[in-house]
Image (cartoon, grey):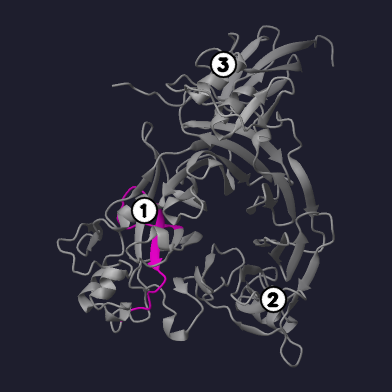
């Protein structure tokens, strides 16, 4: 430290998210404040790269990984064990042919993009195979790929099942042993299909090649929603949902929009019109918007599917991870959409494209039976046992009207500025009939895992855990037995994913009182308790034990040792679109960056720095 430089104390009061609102305070705390080690286990792979696909064998705890020219089997109970490895690469001649067609040497390998279980217990594995997608069969007991008589890997075409290009966005889901995919279907990557990719040849239906159906989509996720007898009195068909972002023709302002598509499992196409094309293809816009500010997040990047009441498909909710194409800096938002709301929109009015102006509006008449609906007991009783029996006017209508009039709307559960989230998983907290909260596990593009607790309108940042190098984005999060298996292209880590010990402070623990958590003042830890909450407001009663000022968060105090002339960035964790403000000693050596505060230390600006973020104003009528 040079002459004239003195060591001083700056007291920073970390209240990264605090608000005054009816019903309590939305809080966030910085990571690493909990009492348990967040990283349980970690493994960096030395012999493989480009790990992109996860498949878990729940009973054994084995995690299968699809990578570049390889499939790995990892024991999740001990990541330090040497993983088993299968090499599935591309012959040299085929690689040279791929390069000769203008592709790079790196891309002309076999990137394993699909691992799914078949009904017979084998794993169906598909790879890009030097821009000529191929699929093979993995025998689990021996952990080998099935071979032909001459010893070569037994393969079948992967076109429509796996993308041609390693980096192409893509999704697939297995439904009752049949594979449904959303992928590019040609070498150039200019044709897109949502299809039933396996099963009897005559039942392999796909989308119509029309920009009204798919317009330059970026596929994100898919989900199979299977009906149960108890929740399906009408005999409705099972459904498959696809999520993506595409170019929109119905909007002048929002050039890209997030979508959800629904198709039905028993759909086999039409007899003449829509022959071997979906007759149940309907899509709707997803709107993740903060209405007070008007900020809309229009790029969908990931979706996690969860049943709020296990065993009840009608309780399904889709947690969507969004960003915005207009933000100059990184921003991430999470919105949740219920299956009920999506179904309501799919059962609502249709949009119609007017050829004169290429805009959509509502059609005047809708034929019967209703276009796009899944087969049910009532339709079968009318003689429509199959989509092949549907009238031509119904098929023509659904071909020309795939888009619904209404959107599925939701407000953000959280918003983070300056951070780019890449993957999302959700742990539900509470009993099946009364889910009171969730923990969001959010992977970043810089190798971190952020855990955020959500209960009602309260969002609390629990931990920010550095897992991998900043050059390794998180590309997988898989939940298993209370743990999160978090992956990057080169590594995998195991992190605690549920339990009261995730909650690092008394106030945060109090907000989880409804899911069985209680603060231990003696141990300064949040613990599970079987003691039933007393009468009155559960959270308010728990907060009384925290000595918190009424309606506010108790600040976490941190002393920073600084020197005059030093530039520091004081963090304020903003989980909401509402603005944040700082209280600090008056001086001119500060600059706010998003919700953080940049400070140049002088003798005059030592003291207390407090950040307060408005979350929501509730007006009582």
Specify the quadrant that holds the N terminus.
top right
Q: Quadrant of residue 145?
A: bottom right
> In the structure shown, which secondary structural element does the residue marked by tag 2 occupy?
strand
The residue to which callout 3 is attached is 544
Give how far across and how far down residue 468 sits, in percent: 74, 47
Give how far across and how far down residue 600 sits, in percent: 67, 18
Q: Is residue 255 magenta?
A: yes
Left or right of 427 in this view: 209: left
Which of the labelled discs sits on residue 138, or is there none?
2
Which of the labelled discs sits on residue 549, or is there none?
none
- Which is nearer the eye, 147 or 591? 147
Residue stretch rendered in magenta on the structure = 244-270
Q: Is residue 17 above or below residue 298?
A: above
Left or right of 506 in this view: 184: left
Specify the quadrant that holds the C terminus.
top left
The residue to which callout 1 is attached is 342
Q: Residues within 10 Å of mark 1 (few under 14, many from 20)?
A: many
Give how far across and how far down residue 404 sits, in percent: 29, 57
Query: Residue reaching furthest left?
Result: 364
Q: Is residue 321 magenta?
A: no
Q: What residue appears at the point 81 percent right and 54 percent down from the top-left corner?
A: 78
Q: Is residue 460 above or below residue 407?
A: above
Camera-side mark, 3 or 1: 3
Q: Quadrant of residue 131?
A: bottom right
> In the structure shown, which secondary structural element does the residue marked by tag 3 occupy?
helix
- Which is nearer the eye, 107 or 269? 269
Left or right of 404 in this view: 173: right
């Amino acid at each position: 430290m040079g002459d004239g430089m003195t060591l001083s104390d700056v007291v920073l009061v970390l209240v990264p998210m605090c608000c005054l609102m009816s019903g309590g305070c939305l809080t966030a705390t910085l990571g690493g404040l909990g009492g348990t080690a967040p990283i349980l286990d970690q493994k960096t792979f030395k012999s493989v790269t480009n790990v992109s696909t996860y498949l878990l064998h729940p009973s054994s705890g084995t995690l299968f990984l699809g990578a570049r020219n390889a499939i790995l089997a990892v024991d999740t109970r001990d990541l330090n064990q040497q993983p088993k490895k299968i090499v599935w690469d591309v012959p040299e001649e085929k690689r040279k042919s791929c390069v000769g067609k203008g592709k790079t040497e790196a891309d002309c390998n076999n990137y394993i993009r699909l691992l799914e279980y078949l009904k017979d217990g084998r794993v169906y594995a598909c790879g890009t195979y030097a821009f000529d997608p191929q699929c093979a069969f993995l025998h689990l007991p021996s952990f080998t790929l099935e071979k032909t008589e001459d010893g070569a890997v037994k393969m079948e075409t992967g076109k429509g099942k796996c993308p041609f290009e390693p980096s192409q966005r893509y999704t697939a889901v297995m439904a009752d042993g049949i594979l449904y995919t959303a992928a590019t279907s040609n070498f150039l990557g200019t044709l897109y299909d949502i299809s039933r990719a396996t099963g009897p040849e005559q039942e392999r239906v796909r989308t119509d090649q029309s920009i009204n159906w798919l317009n330059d989509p970026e596929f994100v996720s898919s989900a199979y929603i299977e009906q149960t007898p108890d929740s399906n009195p009408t005999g409705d068909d099972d459904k498959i949902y696809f999520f993506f972002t595409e170019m929109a023709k119905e909007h002048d302002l929002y050039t890209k929009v997030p979508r959800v598509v629904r198709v039905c499992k028993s759909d086999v196409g039409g007899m003449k019109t829509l022959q071997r094309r979906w007759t149940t293809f309907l899509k709707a816009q997803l709107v993740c918007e903060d209405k007070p500010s008007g900020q809309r997040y229009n790029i969908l990047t990931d979706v996690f599917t969860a049943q709020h009441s296990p065993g009840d498909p009608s309780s399904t909710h889709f947690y969507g991870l969004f960003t915005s194409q207009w933000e100059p800096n990184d921003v991430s938002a999470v919105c949740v959409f219920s299956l009920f709301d999506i179904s309501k929109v799919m059962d609502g009015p249709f949009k119609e494209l007017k050829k004169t102006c290429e805009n959509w509006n509502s059609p005047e008449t809708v034929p019967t039976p209703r276009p796009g609906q899944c087969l049910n007991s009532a339709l079968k009783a009318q003689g429509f046992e199959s989509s092949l029996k549907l009238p031509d006017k119904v098929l023509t209508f659904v071909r020309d009207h795939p888009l619904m009039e209404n959107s599925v709307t939701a407000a953000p559960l959280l918003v983070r500025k300056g951070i780019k989230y890449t993957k999302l998983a959700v742990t539900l907290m509470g009993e099946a009939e009364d889910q009171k909260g969730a923990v969001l596990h959010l992977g970043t593009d810089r190798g971190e895992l952020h855990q955020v607790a959500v209960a009602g309108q309260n969002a609390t940042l629990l931990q920010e855990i550095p897992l991998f190098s900043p050059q390794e984005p998180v590309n997988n999060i898989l939940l298993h037995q209370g743990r999160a298996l978090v992956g990057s292209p080169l590594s995998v880590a195991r992190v605690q994913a549920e339990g009261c010990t995730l909650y690092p402070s008394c106030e945060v623990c109090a907000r989880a009182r409804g899911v069985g958590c209680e603060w231990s003042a003696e141990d300064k830890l949040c613990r599970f308790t079987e003691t039933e909450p007393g009468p009155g407001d559960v959270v308010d009663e728990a907060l009384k034990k925290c000595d918190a000022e009424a309606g506010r968060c108790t600040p976490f105090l941190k002393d920073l040792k600084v020197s005059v002339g030093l530039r520091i960035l004081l963090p304020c964790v903003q989980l909401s679109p509402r603005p944040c403000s700082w209280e600090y000693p008056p001086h001119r050596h500060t600059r706010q960056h998003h919700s953080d505060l940049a400070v140049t230390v002088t003798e005059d600006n030592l003291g207390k720095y407090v950040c307060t973020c408005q979350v929501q104003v509730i007006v009582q009528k």
